[in-house]
Amino acid sequence: CQQRYETNPLRIFDCKSPTCQEIVKEAPTITSCLCDSCREHLDQVEKGLEMTGVSYVLDTGLVRGLDYYTKTAFEVMVSGIGAQSSIGGGGRYDQLVAEIGGPEMSGIGFAVGLERTILTMEAQGIGPRTDSSPQVYIAHVTEKEKPAAFRLAATLRQEGISARTDVMDRSLKAQFKYADRQGFTHVITLGETEATSGMYGIKDMLRGSQETLSAGDLIRYLQGGNDNE
C-alpha cells in the first residue's frame, strides 16, 4: 500500500484495512481545509441540492479514483439493489481541458453503471420513456428568482415532465435565445410576480400561443390535459 498512497495520499480514505481506518480517524477532514473559494462553491452546491429537493450526505471520506477532479466529487446512491448501492459518480474537472492542450474550460463528468441502473429501474417500477413529452425551459428574470425556478423544475420532473433552468447566470435575453436554439417546446418565464403568486406564464414555442396557469393547471397542461387545445 505504501507506494500507492505516496502517489496519491487521499487514496488512504478508500482503504478498507483496519490500520488505515485508524489513521483516518485522526486525520483532518477535507472540509476542514477548504479555501474561501472552495467553501463558497460547496455552499452553492448544497443550496442547489436543497432547492431541488435532492437528499444528500456530505461524505468527508469520499474519494474518486481519477486525480484530475477539482472541487465537488459525488456518487449517486440508491437502496433496494443489494450491497452495491452506488449506480454512478463523477465530479468537476476545471483544469483538465487546459492540461491536455485545450482552452481554459470548466467541466463536469460522470459514469453510470448500466446493470445497476437497470436493477434500480426495475426495483422502482420505472420503464424507459417512449413518448414525446414536452421539453420545458424555465427562464428566471433575475438571480432572486433562481431558487423558485429550481423548485419549479424539480416539481415538474417529479411529475414526469422534462424541465431545465439556467445555471450559467445568463441574462433573460440570453436564456430565451438558448431555449430557442436548443429546441425546447415550452418556455416558462419566472419573475418576482410569478414566484410570489404561483401563477406562471408559459409559451408554446411550436404554436406561439401563451397561457397563464396555476401550478396544478400547468402540470395538467404539460401532461396533455389542456382543454384549450
Image: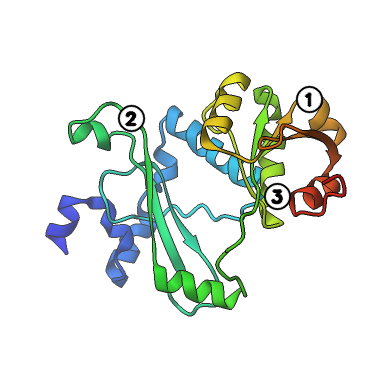
Residue 54's x, y, as percent? 62, 53
Picture quarter containing residue 198?
top right
Q: Which badge, 1 or 2, is on the more N-terminal residue?
A: 2
Question: Image quadrant for the N terminus?
Answer: bottom left
Observer-side mark, 2 or 3, equals 3
Name the secondary structure under disc 3. helix
Q: Is residue 190 above or below residue 85?
A: above
**Which colouring convention does the figure follow?**
rainbow
Residue 217 in view in this figure: yes
Residue 156 is marked as: 3
Amino acid identity at mark 2: Met
Picture quarter containing residue 65?
bottom left
Picture quarter containing residue 125?
bottom right
Amino acid identity at mark 3: Leu
Residue at left offset 55%, top offset 67%: 128
Q: Which badge, 3 or 1, is on the more N-terminal residue?
A: 3
Q: Are marks 1 and 2 in contact (CB under 8 Å)?
A: no
Residue under label 1? 192
Residue 210's x, y, as percent? 78, 32
Q: Which badge, 2 or 3, is on the more N-terminal residue?
A: 2
Amino acid identity at mark 1: Glu
Q: Is residue 91 above or below residue 113?
A: above
Foreground pick, 169 / 94: 169
Residue at left offset 16%, top offset 58%: 4
Residue under label 2? 105
Task: Say left or right for 98 vs 114.
Answer: left
How far, Cα to Cα, is label 1 from label 2? Answer: 33 Å
Residue 211's x, y, as percent? 82, 35
Name the secondary structure under disc 2. loop
Residue at left offset 36%, top offset 33%: 106
Observer-side mark, 3 or 1, equals 3
Residue 140's x, y, as percent? 67, 28
